[in-house]
Image (spheres, grey):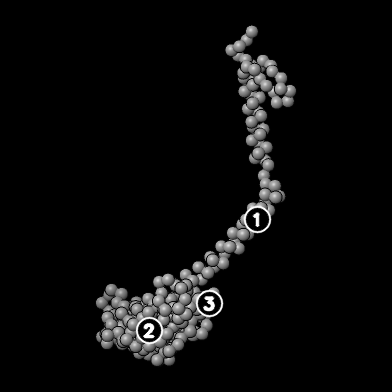
Amino acid sequence: MQTSNSIIYLTDNTRQISQLPRDIVNFSLSRQMNSLCWMKIQRGFTLIELLIGISIISILLAVGLPSFIYDFDKNKLITASEQLYSHLQQARIESISRSNSITLTFSGSGSSNWLYGYNQGTAACDLSKTSPTDNNACIVIINDGDAVVDGVNGGVDDGDKVLKRFTNSQFSDVSMALSGFSNGSQITFNPMRGISDSGQINLTSAQGLKLRVNVTALGMIKICDPIGTSSFYSVSSC
């Protein structure tokens, strides 16, 4: 009677007890397990499971997509207003540091196709000029490190001319409207304590959100909410 090389084997089909060698039993069990795994891999999704999955995804999109679009729209408006605010502050600082007037010129008010730029002096620059070497382009002179400074002691150096022209290419769905300007579509910063012309630059997003960049006659620049809603937690009402 063999006991060491055999075990009691219970088959799935007949439930009969028989004495089989251990290696045969292991081989049989291995084949059955492989067959079950292969069936699970090949099973895939049923039509009902697929429809349930599609329904869940549709519900999540319906709930989350409007919120995502709103946040994206709001962030784009905030970025546009902060960029404009930064350029206005930069122009004011340039005026004081250079002891020379700096004038910002705006174009495209009332539309989403706007641009602006600034230059030295009190005259408006030509916003259609896209090269710093063009006549009447929106530029400031910054020494490029050589011994010649453009416009100083008769010096001519195109490398000192830096274009200061800004478009709404990153904010194509944000519209701009000017209001309360005391000098047409221009704001000139005076080097005497940084005082300036006054004006309001109103920005509106595609979803109707609004922000305003306000410039006072004292040269104070501020971003504010003209509607006074709670949409912008870090921005005060105008």
Q: Secondary structure at mark 1?
A: helix
Q: Secondary structure at mark 3?
A: loop
Tell me the quarter of the image containing the N terminus: top right
The residue singled out by tag 3 in the image is 208
**Lateral position of residue 224 relative to residue 41, left or right:** left
Residue closest to the eye, 177 or 122: 177
- Residue at 51% x, 85% y: name it: 110
On the image, numbered disc 1 is attached to which residue? 54
Mark 1 neighbour density, 10 Å: few (under 14) some (14–19) many (20 or more): few
* Amino acid on which disc 1 is placed: Ile
* Residue on which disc 2 sits: 215
Whether residue 39 can be seen here: yes
Q: Which mark is residue 41?
A: none
Q: Secondary structure at mark 2?
A: strand
Q: Position of residue 142 (x, y in %)?
A: 31, 78
Disc 3 versus disc 2: nearer the observer: 3
Q: Residue at x 48, y 78 (%)?
A: 210
Relative to residue 157, is residue 15 depicted above or below? above
State the separation of the CA atoms marked 1 and 3.
32 Å
Callout 3 crowding tier (Cα within 10 Å): few <14, some 14–19, many ≥20 = few
First in sequence: mark 1 vs mark 2: 1
